[in-house]
Each structure stands twice: as C-alpha cells, then as structure tokens.
Image: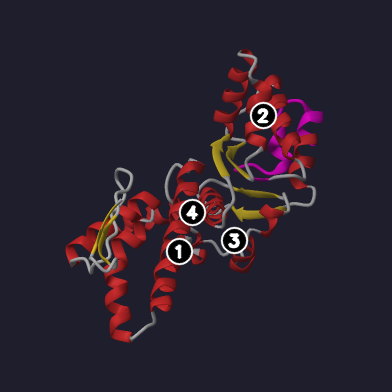
Amino acid sequence: MTTTTSTAGTTVGTSTSTAAGRPKRTGRQPSEQAIDAAIDSATRLLRLPTVRDRYGEFADAASREQLSYRAFLSELLLAECDDREQRRAARRVHEAGFPRPKTLAEFDFNANTAINPATINTLAGCGWVGKGQSLCLIGDSGTGKSHLLIGLGTAAAQAGHKVRYVLAAKLVNELVEAADERQLSRTIARYGRVELLCLDELGYLGLDKRGAELLFQVLTEREEKTAVAIASNDSFSGWTKTFTDPRLCTAIVDRLTFGGNIIETGTSSYRLAHARNQRGRKA
C-alpha cells in the first residue's frame, strides 16, 4: 500500500493493491465505469450472478422510489436468493432424468374424469414424499399415468427433494449388470439415497426370477424410509405376469401398497380419443 501525506501529516490520497482479480479501493469518488467494473469483478468473485446482472435495474428503481441504502441492498440480495433457488430447482429437475418435461398444470383433468384433481393437488404438496410413502398409478395405456408420474416427480424436485426417474426394465438391467460386476450393494445404496424414486412402465415386460429379486431388494431398501412412485398398465392381480414367483409378487405388492396412495387412472385412452378427434377434423 502507498500513502501520500501533506506536510501537516494528513492523508490526501490512498491506493490499495489487492490480490489478482479483486477490485481496488481508493479514497476518491470513482467514475461510473470504475464502479461498474468493480461490481462486475466482486460479484464474479463472490458468485452472485443476479446481483451482477440486475444491480443497475435495482439501483434505478431504488432511486425512483427513494429507498434507503439498506432497503435497496435487501431487495437486491433477496432477488439473488430467489434466483439461486430457482436454479437449484431446475438442476434437481434435470438430474432426475425425466424423459420429457411434464407438469401438473399441463394435465387435462377434463380428458380423464376418473382422476380427482383434489387428490393430485394434495399429492403435489409432497407430504407423502417426506413421510417415505408410496404412490401407485394404475391404469391402461394413454390414461395419463406417466404424465402424472413425471408431473408429481417434477413438483417434488422443485420442492427440494432429490428425485430419480427410471423405466422398470432399465433399472432391472442396471441391477443385473451391477450384480455381475460385484457392484450391487453400491447401486442399491445409491438408489436408496434418492428421496423419491419414480418407476415407470412396471408391468410392460415380464421379469425373470433374478430380475424380480433384485428389484425387490431396491424396494426393501426404501421401505418406509424414502418414497417410491410407480406407474403400471396392469392391476395388482395381473402382476403375476411380470413377477412370475407368486410369493415374490405378493411381497412386492405389499411393499408398494402398505400405507401408500393408489390412484386408478381408468381404461379410456386420452391419446386414442385425441387421435380419433384429429382424424375426424381432417376428414
């Protein structure tokens, strides 16, 4: 640091050297360009992108509304916090691995009156996820099961929960490969740490005894600790076609239904009806 003093010993100018990349401070009123450069440098160093991008906007608004310095700073920092949480929520949704974006707001309850909107809205509150409960969506193809599964999973991720979406057959294949490579315990533990496991298309393909046993281990690891949601095109009584071992099938159904939520989406395919309407309009 260098200091210049007058003969009376009073300081007339001060400049401070700082580490590389940090802004420099002086005792003089800096130019607007210097202020902008200092804010840009400091916010990059502190990783405050919203402050960097919007401080001018907030400063102009504070001047118009005659806000105090503290009020201006409060508004700016709250905007940073809000944007940071939105970025975190978006990252959790991305990491969940959903195959396509689907939200509950986009779901057409008029197209499937078998589904109670109030029930879905309650589930969207994610209380069942925090309690480690299960959710079973049962119905024919095209009735909205996957949409609801992804929509509720997205709501859970946005609410702060760690979510993972996977097709049932893909999960079983992953477990079989992990077992062959002696990594099964690690893989099961990794799925056990996810707060909500969304398992889609359960029942579309039959599973051999080994695959069913491995899936059962995942469900057992999660039982009453972390939530699981499944979508299946077959009723529970028809799961014997997927899980050929009757005892194992009964055990899996018990794991998924005990203290859980069951929603039947019906048999009328929305996709089929929509396709027919489209063809009728073209005709």
Q: Earlier in the sequence, mark 3 or mark 1?
A: 1
Question: What kind of colouring is applied to the model shown?
Answer: secondary structure
Residue at left 58%, top 18%?
Answer: 177
Q: Amino acid at mark 1?
A: Asp
Q: Amino acid at mark 4?
A: Ala
Q: Secondary structure at mark 2?
A: helix
Q: Earlier in the sequence, mark 4 or mark 3?
A: 4
The magenta region covers: 227-250
Determine whether label 4 and label 1 are within 8 Å by CB.
no
The residue beneath circle 2 is 188
Q: Amino acid at mark 3?
A: Ala
The residue beneath circle 3 is 124
Is 229 situated above or below 217? Answer: below
The residue beneath circle 4 is 89
Q: Secondary structure at mark 4?
A: helix
Q: Taking the image as drawn, is residue 230 in sight?
A: no
